[in-house]
Image (cartoon, helix red, strand yellow):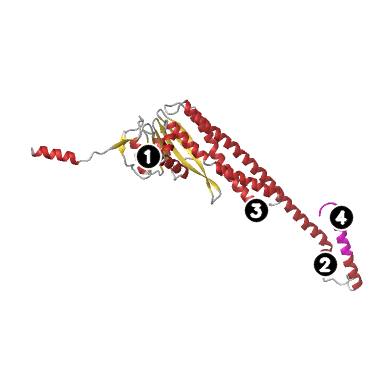
């Protein structure tokens, strides 16, 4: 009797541990994990059909979590531990692995920096991984977490639509910076043709040329990545999501055309500024040459009469000395008139 009472008491005293399903994908090893995420760097948003896990710091705990919960290929896990140089798309039977590069404008250095976002997407789950905390991804994630209307809209369908919403936001968030670069190039063009050519202008052109080249390296491979993504057929990537990714591809192609226009403008302005600066330099050198030629008779005469030689003609006659000065002045006027007639002045 005492044993039965003790057994009933011990059973009631132990709290039940509730667990939550993070996804229903066959690529998840364990169907459940505790409500609390393994780390503050790993955050999740869940619905009945879809789970989004955001990892904003790649450390041993994050790698262990991915290994224990999912059957991802070991090469993909190696890729997320180091930053890659170019975007990529790897296709597997039940999931896709993407490496996306998001352009970011650094106002202090006036340069384009890239934030890499690694993405695993499968049926019922989306995992985003950042090597450095991206403000764009963070804002998107917290908008989805805090606002029920946005969460319902972005996670209303499958993981493919959520991926589209994320990529659209990341790429289009850079549009204001692209417009800013265009306005700055227009301002530089006005300064060039208003007669302002200096080293500061050349430096600004070099800065924006570097930024445009960086954008070309980022956008070009991702155009083809989006085109390939639009043609992949998976349970989470159907004909409807294909239209969405085609839309992103069209946007990147338009962005590519704008970047090409900026590149051509910078090259044209660079050649124009160099030509104008060279013209100014040549004009200064021409003026200095004219002055040297005009002073040449005086230099020759001073050199001759400056030598310690006796018996030089007119050396002791003050009248002839003043006559020589008058002759040299007239010769200087004649030289200047000749140079002016030839448009050397």
**Disc 1 residue crowd, few under 14, some 14–19, many 20+, Cα 10 Å:** some
The residues bearing labels 2 and 4 have C-alpha atoms spaced at a distance of 24 Å
Chief SS of the magenta region: helix
The residue mark sitting in front, 3 or 4, is 3
Identify the secondary structure beneath mark 4. helix
Decide: is 217 above or below 313: above
Q: Which residue is mark 3?
A: 199
Q: Earlier in the sequence, mark 3 or mark 4?
A: 3
Would you say the residues marked 1 and 3 are in contact, meaning their CB atoms lie under 8 Å apart? Answer: no
**Disc 3 residue crowd, few under 14, some 14–19, many 20+, Cα 10 Å:** few
- Whole-percent x, y for residue 113 in the image: 52, 45
Decide: is 209 above or below 294: above
Q: Earlier in the sequence, mark 4 or mark 1?
A: 1
Q: Which residue is mark 2?
A: 302
Q: Which residue is mark 1?
A: 44
The residues bearing labels 3 and 4 have C-alpha atoms spaced at a distance of 35 Å
Residue 330 falls inside the magenta stretch: yes
- Asked if residue 313 shows in the view, the reply is no
Q: Earlier in the sequence, mark 2 or mark 1?
A: 1
Q: Earlier in the sequence, mark 2 or mark 4?
A: 2
Q: Which residue is mark 4?
A: 338
Q: Which residues are magenta?
A: 327-345
The residue mark sitting in front, 1 or 3, is 1
Quadrant assignment for the C terminus: bottom right
The residues bearing labels 2 and 3 have C-alpha atoms spaced at a distance of 41 Å
Q: Earlier in the sequence, mark 1 or mark 3?
A: 1
The residues bearing labels 4 and 1 have C-alpha atoms spaced at a distance of 85 Å
Would you say the residues marked 2 and 4 are in contact, meaning their CB atoms lie under 8 Å apart? Answer: no
> Which residue occupies 64% across, 51% down?
201
The residues bearing labels 1 and 3 have C-alpha atoms spaced at a distance of 51 Å
Judging depth in this view, the residue of 333 and 61 nearest the camera is 61
């Amino acid at each position: 009797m005492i044993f039965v009472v003790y057994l009933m008491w011990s059973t009631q005293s132990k709290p039940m541990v509730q667990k939550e399903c993070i996804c229903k994908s066959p690529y998840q090893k364990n169907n459940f994990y505790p409500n609390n995420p393994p780390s503050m760097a790993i955050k999740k948003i869940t619905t009945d059909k879809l789970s989004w896990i955001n990892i904003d710091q790649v450390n041993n705990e994050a790698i262990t979590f991915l290994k224990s919960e999912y059957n991802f290929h070991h090469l993909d896990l190696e890729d997320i531990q180091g930053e890659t140089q170019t975007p990529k798309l790897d296709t597997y039977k039940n999931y896709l692995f993407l490496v996306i590069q998001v352009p970011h404008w650094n106002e202090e250095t006036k340069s384009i920096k890239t934030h890499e976002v690694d993405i695993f997407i499968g049926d019922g789950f989306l995992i985003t991984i950042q090597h450095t905390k991206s403000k764009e991804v963070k804002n998107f994630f917290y908008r989805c977490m805090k606002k029920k209307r946005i969460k319902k809209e972005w996670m209303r369908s499958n993981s493919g639509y959520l991926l589209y919403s994320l990529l659209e936001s990341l790429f289009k968030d850079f549009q204001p910076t692209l417009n800013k670069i265009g306005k700055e190039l227009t301002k530089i063009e006005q300064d060039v043709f208003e007669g302002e050519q200096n080293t500061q202008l050349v430096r600004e052109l070099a800065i924006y040329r570097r930024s445009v080249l960086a954008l070309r390296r980022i956008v070009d491979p991702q155009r083809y990545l989006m085109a390939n993504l639009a043609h992949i057929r998976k349970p989470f990537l159907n004909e409807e999501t294909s239209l969405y990714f085609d839309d992103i591809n069209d946007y990147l192609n338009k962005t590519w055309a704008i970047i090409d226009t900026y590149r051509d403008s910078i090259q044209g302005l660079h050649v124009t500024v160099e030509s104008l600066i060279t013209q100014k330099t040549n004009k200064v050198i021409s003026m200095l040459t004219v002055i040297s030629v005009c002073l040449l008779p005086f230099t020759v005469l001073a050199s001759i009469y400056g030598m310690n030689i006796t018996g030089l003609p007119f050396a002791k006659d003050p009248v002839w000395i003043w006559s020589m000065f008058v002759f040299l002045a007239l010769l200087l006027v004649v030289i200047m008139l000749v140079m002016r007639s030839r448009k050397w002045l």
